[in-house]
Amino acid sequence: MPLKRECLVLLVLSWVSSVRAQDENRVVFSLGTFQNVSVPVNGTVQAVVSRIPADVSFITLQFHTQHSNITLSYSQVPLYGFSVTAVDAGLLSSLIPSQTTLSWFLKTPDGSSAAGVGVILPYTSTDPVPGACNLEFALDNDPNIYLLYNLFETTITFAPANIGYERGEIPPACDVDTGSSTRWRLVYEVYQYFLPEGDLSEKSLISGMERVANVQNLQDNSRKVVTLSSHDRTQFSFNSLPGQGVIFSVIVRDPVLNSSASYIPVHTYACSFNSSLDGCSDLGRVSTKVFFTVIGLAGLFVCFVGHRFFKCELFCMGFGFMAFLFFILITRTTTTLEYDIRLALTALMGVVGGVALVMSWWRFGSVMACVLVVGLILGFLISSIAFFTPLGDIPIFHNDAVFWVVFACIMVVVPLFFIRWPREGNIVTCGVVGAYAVVLSVNAYTYTSLSYITLDVLKRLLNNNFSRAFISVPLQDIDFILITVWAVLGVSGIVVQLYREKARAFFPPSPYLMWKQERERRKTNVLDPSHHKPSLSTRILDRIRQLTRRTEPAGETTPLLL
């Protein structure tokens, strides 16, 4: 009897463990509620939703992980055309009459474990169907947004939607007619949501996804970038922001029925968690930190005493001018050099440019020519600031010809003021540009959007396709702090230098010209003792003759008188 009891207990325990195992691989969703899901190693999880209301015509399932690919499938064995694999994946299922239950399957493509968050959203027959007119991707109804990124731009692509329909009805034709009763009346709104700066945590991503999962939350928490008609291309480009988390989503609207539906949100950090080539953990290179730390210290020096030490200011400005041009040249012409080598060569050529600008002033003494070069640097920064604002996203400036003409005009106009007020213009340049160099040095250690003031222009010079990108970037707490630091440093530097230099000469004289004037003065002034002093060349020749002349023997050469 005890043996039978023990066997019965073992059978019950085994049954309970099998039920638990089945429950672990089966997740029940509630409509509109986020659910945490863990996919075991070499396992498949079934996502189930029940009690679907009768007025719901189609349902979307979306699942998000931070950096692990997940496969969503209509069947337990994924098949091409009936499954999708991505970090942000989604499926759309149309319902048949009287259907109240639906299920999908989740697994990882390589059999590893993964954890993420998913949500199921219902839509009625009046809502447009995202991706129902897909002709490009594998799924028949594809509500996914496909994202590609590189160092310069991030591009999203999605399939056109169709107008809604009742359960059991045949979907309306996509491209038979273009009238107001077809899918061509639909409009698309592209939204962008920025995660906290420098936050690469999974918790931050999940919180962001919950804020943009459905239409209402997306409208309340995100920023609308652009509105596209059904005749526009369903593709859009953005500025890549390595290390900055961004979520993109699309809302399709039916203006006739005043209804809407959302595509599956997709996120990117413009860097990889799994690759060492563009890894998110290697964004702050040591070489970059060293380079921009030196730039920041030089900028702080120029900001407060640049005009007082004119030669040092010219060297710093010439360094920046030449380094920027050379980095563009070497990057566009040479793609095989590593980043550290390009940065070292850029620094070397920057030194050459700084020395060349100083020597041109030392030899020719043309202060105005040097100040105009300094003014061009200030004009470049002001023009970059102008296009960093929403002005840069006006469609007309996506044309390269228009952009560069306007950019160059702003850049050239600024130095014209230096002709009338050269000293004041030079001091203002020292304050503004020097303070911005300090801001750039901070970016080497922590993310800040202010670095994209000049980086966007650099990207446009290096990449021919960057002009189509939407370049707007977020301004968060660290950016407002750095804007305040920039303003305080710039104003303080300008005021200090104007006060210190008000009793001094506008610009220091050229050492070479002073030496020539002194030499002419000595030639004409016979009362000056230096007038009778041999020239430098004569003195050098006399010294050489003394060193090469044979020494006469010492001693008495006349007869001794006895």
Image (spheres, helix red, strand yellow):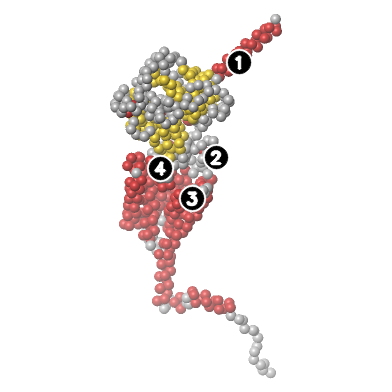
What is the distance, in whole Å, between disc 3 and disc 1 at their CAs?
Answer: 62 Å
Name the amino acid, label 3: Thr
Q: Is residue 484 placed above or below 40 in the rendered structure?
A: below
Tell me the SS state at disc 2. Answer: loop
Question: Earlier along the polypeptide chain: callout 4 or callout 1?
Answer: 1
Residue wearing tag 1: 17
Tell me the SS state at disc 4. Answer: helix
Name the amino acid, label 1: Ser
Q: Residue at x 67, y 92 (%)?
A: 560
Tell me the SS state at disc 1. Answer: helix
Q: Is residue 200 placed above or below 61 in the rendered structure?
A: below
Question: Earlier along the polypeptide chain: callout 4 or callout 3?
Answer: 3
Say which mark, if any, is on residue 426. none
What is the distance, in whole Å, between disc 4 and disc 3 at their CAs?
Answer: 19 Å
Q: Which mark's residue is nearer the viewer, 4 or 1? A: 4
Name the amino acid, label 2: Ser
